[in-house]
Image (cartoon, rainbow, N blue to C red):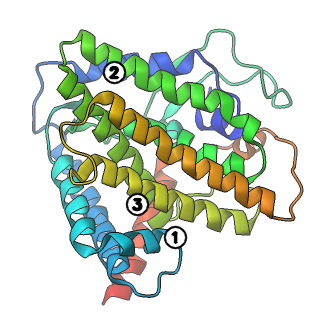
Amino acid sequence: VEQLSNQFCDGIVDPRVAPQIADTLAKLHNIKEFDPDFNELVKPCMLNLFEQMKHIAQEASNTTNPKDRTEAYCASLGEDIVMKIIEANIANYHQRDCLLHSDSHAFNTLVEAKPSIEELETFGPKGTVVLCDWEMSMAGPQGRDIGLALSFPVGCLIAHALNGQSEANESIEVFINTIIDTYLSRMEEAGKTPEEIAALLRNIAGWCGWFQYLGCYILGMVESYPVESDETVGRHSDALGTLGFKFLRLSYDTDYLAASASTEEVRKIFNSLWEEEVTRAQDVFAAGKQRRRPRKSSIFRIANRRQSDTEMLYLAAESVKRLSVSKE
């Protein structure tokens, strides 16, 4: 087996994967009998990260000299709007809508290993998918799991565009649309109203943005993306910070998009936001002097290495320490 993240890095994703992830998470989320206090001890460490995100966002919203596009976007919104968004995100984290995996990103999704690392388009024979690392599971906000599952694929869309490899994004776009379509269909079958489906999609966008803004931009967990140079890493991180906060605004700012907005309206804005960022990345590549390089297999597959949650959490903890010292 290998991590699903490798396929997004390759730019060619097994089409059998997305429906299985959506079906699995839908079944979990539709379990009716559960303890709302299940595994509550996982929350304090996460809430510390929320507080650091709040502090960074508040500072950015008040800056008169933004260092990048992300800070400039927060400054354009102003402190009142930025704090409203962050507080709503934190309040949503405390909701207990259903049981969650709560850590359902592409590194915790295992698939069959490709038979050959030289062949980008070759998959395992069965299309097997397994969700692993359930230690963060809890009762929480519906939408978080799918949002986390989408965060790395959306980030890879931008990475490939910055590399001039936009053809790599075709199957990633299919994955994104398939997992959303399948999951929302399962929720409709379970009896969700159109209004509930629209609210759920907003939550999906918000949690996708949360991971990109906090995990990738603030905490710097970007080494796994298929970027080609130090300059590209910086641009990619800033793009994820900007897009992540735009997704958060889509989810939690009802002055930006009314609470009564339909699923179609939410989906249209969600798609337009990431499409705009991908187009910008394509333009950055076209304006630069770097030569287009051929796509290659994920460096993690080539090195027979996995990116672990332990490593991610260690990096996050070290970042929180640095932020705390800086704040003092």
In the rendered view, would you say 221 is above or below 36? below
Please identify, in this view, whether the residue under mark 1 or under mark 3 is nearer the observer.
1
Q: Position of residue 225 (x, y in %)?
A: 64, 50
Residue 47 against residue 203 in the figure, above or below: below
Distance between the alpha carbons at the discs numbered 3 and 2: 26 Å
Earlier along the polypeptide chain: callout 1 or callout 3?
A: 1
Give the residue pinned by disc 2: 184
Q: Nearer the viewer, residue 292 or 22?
A: 292
Q: Is residue 239 visible?
A: yes
Between label 1 and label 2, give the one nearer the viewer. 1
Residue indicated by mark 3: 214
Write down the residue under mark 1.
69
- Give SS at disc 2: helix
CB contact under 8 Å: marks 1 and 3? no
Residue for point 87% across, 65% down: 289
Q: Nearer the viewer, residue 132 or 17?
A: 17
Q: Quadrant of the N terminus?
A: top right
Tag 2 or tag 3, which sits nearer the N-term? 2
